Amino acid sequence: MIEVKNLVKKYGEQVAVDHLDFRLEPGRIYGFLGPNGAGKSTTMNMMTGYLGATEGTIEINGHDILKEPEAAKRHIGYLPEIPPLYTDMTVSEYLYFAAELKGIAKKEWEKAVQEVMQAVRLEEVQMRLIRNLSKGYRQRVGLAQALLGFPEILILDEPMVGLDPKQIIEIRELIRGLGNKHTVILSSHILAEVREICDYILIISRGKLVAGDTPENLEHLLNGQNTLELEAKAGLEETRDILKKVPEIIRAQIERTEEGTAFAKVHTEPAGRNGLGKKTDVREKIFFAFSEAACPLLLLKPSKASLEEVFMQLTQGGEQIQETGSDASFSMKEEEGSEVSSVQEEGTEASFVQEEEGTEASFIQEEGQLEGSGIKGEKKEGGR
Ligand SMILES: Nc1ncnc2c1ncn2[C@@H]1O[C@H](COP(=O)(O)OP(=O)(O)O)[C@@H](O)[C@H]1O
Ligand SMILES: [Mg+2]
């Protein structure tokens, strides 16, 4: 078991890891998910004893990583973000060398090296110099090194980076297999990489833990809360103009369906915020807005948030959330790849953001709202 308490890392004034608290149980696969620069590698470097913490403690099976480094490290296999490979060695030379460094008894080297080469399918390149290997194979050598002796806990920093889709599937299967007997912690900035294999996801943003739950529960977190889907017999621009009349709508993505109708995903204020009155039901307002414009509303229902949306909102990575103009209450954002000039007339997608200082996305982390799902009940500063 790994217990991280109040973990802080500062680089000068910059806080890279900001009071992390979590406990990882044996026999599970955990995903550290967060955008680049979130603090994943820094956290892993501290968990494996390669970096000292500014504050806080880390215990690996009851051993403090700084006070009893040898005892603690014995339980850990680590694949750093940039594996320290000796490129002038052959794969097998390097793995024997790594086995020695790990303190594996000499008589067990051969068995240990054979086992890991088999596990990550390196046998056919074992006599090749590491320098001549492709990125994918080098990554596997790094992984093999982490697996040597099959330690109880495996900490893998971005293990899929640089791998092609086929290799990703292979590594994923390998990790899934390891998860039966080992505790695996892997980091990624790509949601798709972790959702498939992780039992539990810890979302890290700006050094803080903003969510921790199973992929399924994270998905349920926002479901229906503040997102609506609607379809109207109207053009893109028309739909956008109607939606703009509803002040509770923070932003919307609108696209044209094959049938020529407009389909929109609408993010709204929770009822009762900003003095909008407790019982405001945005759906009523949307209904009347379309009705006034004499546009038939064909569908209006709460939307199921995808895990992507949860991730984007929690990490504030949503590109829909854009700052535009000084006091613009709405703005158009062209979807990537569509032609700027044609979006409104003939494009197939449109979206807008309703700017109201400090409101966008901040509802997700509002105090107490996410408690019970392992979310810290801390208040986030909205706005920038
Ligand atoms: N050695 C260092 N010196 C100064 N700042 C660093 C150092 N290492 C990382 N950082 C900063 O700490 C933050 C977290 O980095 P990192 O842990 O590498 O994030 P991640 O692995 O999630 O991409 C980033 O803002 C990064 O620039
Ligand atoms: Mg990193």
Image (cartoon, grey):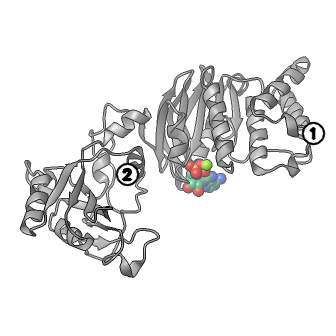
Horizontal and vertical percent for residue 155? Answer: 64, 34
Image quarter (top left, top right, bottom left or bottom right) of the N terminus: top right
- Give the SS element for disc 2: helix
- 357 or 31: which is nearer to us? 31
Q: Earlier in the sequence, mark 2 or mark 1?
A: 1
Q: Which residue is mark 1?
A: 127
Depth check, mark 2 against mark 1: the one in front is: 1
| Residue 263 figure quarter | bottom left
Q: Which residue is mark 2?
A: 313
Tag 1: amino acid = Met
With 201 as the anchor, is 138 left or right in this view?
right
| Residue 247 figure quarter | bottom left
- 62 or 331: which is nearer to us? 331
Horizontal and vertical percent for residue 314? Answer: 39, 48
The structure residue drawn at horizontal position 53% and vertical position 55%, both measured from the top left corner, is: 14
Horizontal and vertical percent for residue 246? Answer: 15, 63
The structure residue drawn at horizontal position 89% and vertical position 23%, both measured from the top left corner, is: 110
With 289 as the anchor, is 147 left or right in this view?
right
Cβ at disc 1 under 8 Å from ligand 2: no
- Give the SS element for disc 1: loop
